Image (cartoon, grey):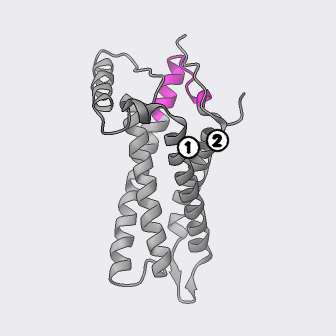
Amino acid sequence: MNTLVNKYPLALRITHAGLAIFGIFAYLTGEFAEETEHGLSVGYWLHAYLGLTLALFLISHIIGRLASSDRVKSGQLAGSRYFFASIREDIGQLLRFRLPLREDHGGLAGLVQVFGLLIFLWMSITGIILLYLGGAEVSGLAHSVAEAHEVGEQLIPIFLFLHVGAVILHSIAGHAIWQRMNPFTK
């Protein structure tokens, strides 16, 4: 059994849990975020506050990842040569029917992580703009921003499929990588 032993710091595990919990609930309440003839619905405010909380966890997670990682110093960040080379390596391993396993968030795992963080960032920015503009039903700019917000809504299931699917595949293969991010284990 090939298991990664590196455990993430508790603060990062908590922010990851916050991203998962508030991200999923904000996504699920998105259909209730509408205007009524009496103004913005309770569902709108529930969705908005879940989204704002998600944005706080997102900012904390990004700052925590950058502050706690040697990846910044070693050039392993998204967009670096290492990042793209590790993605090519991982694709090569998948083509040979081997599941890539890395200590860092490089390769395909890093690509999926960046994809998810960018989606959450997109949703947070467009959601905050919508909140500031007073809802999605206003014409003009708010309508355009609402359409942009819905693009992110279509990408979230893709991210969840990739992220959760990879965790499940690794667990089936005997790599309990999910335990590294679990905030409730020592």
Q: Are marks 1 and 2 in contact (CB under 8 Å)?
A: yes
Q: Is residue 4 left or right of residue 85?
A: right
Mark 1, residue position = 64
Labels in figure, total: 2
The answer to whether residue 24 is seen in the rendering is no
**SS at mark 1 in the image:** helix
The residues tagged by marks 1 and 2 sit, at their Cα atoms, a distance apart of: 7 Å
Q: Residues within 10 Å of mark 1 (few under 14, many from 20)?
A: some
Q: Residue 149 placed where, x, y %?
A: 40, 65
Element marked by disc 2: helix
The extreme top residue here reads 1
Q: Using a 10 Å C-alpha cutoff, classify the residue at mark 2 as few (fewer than 14 neighbours), some (14 to 19) or many (20 or more).
A: some
Quadrant location, the N terminus? top right
Amino acid at the residue labelled 1:
Gly
Taking 141 as reference, is 35 left or right? Answer: right
* Residue 131 picture location, percent across and down: 50, 75
> Where does the magenta region start and end?
165-180
Identified at 60% across, 40% down, the residue is 12
Give above or below for 130 relative to 171. Answer: below
Is 168 magenta? The answer is: yes
Between residues 141 and 56, which one lies in front from this camera angle? 56
- Residue at 59% across, 19% down: 5
Q: Which amino acid, mark 2?
A: Ala
Q: Position of residue 179 (x, y in %)?
A: 62, 27
Q: Which residue is mark 2?
A: 11
Name the residue at 39% across, 64% down: 150
Q: Quadrant of the C terminus?
A: top right
**Residue 7, how many percent across, how many down?**
61, 27
Q: Is residue 7 visible?
A: yes
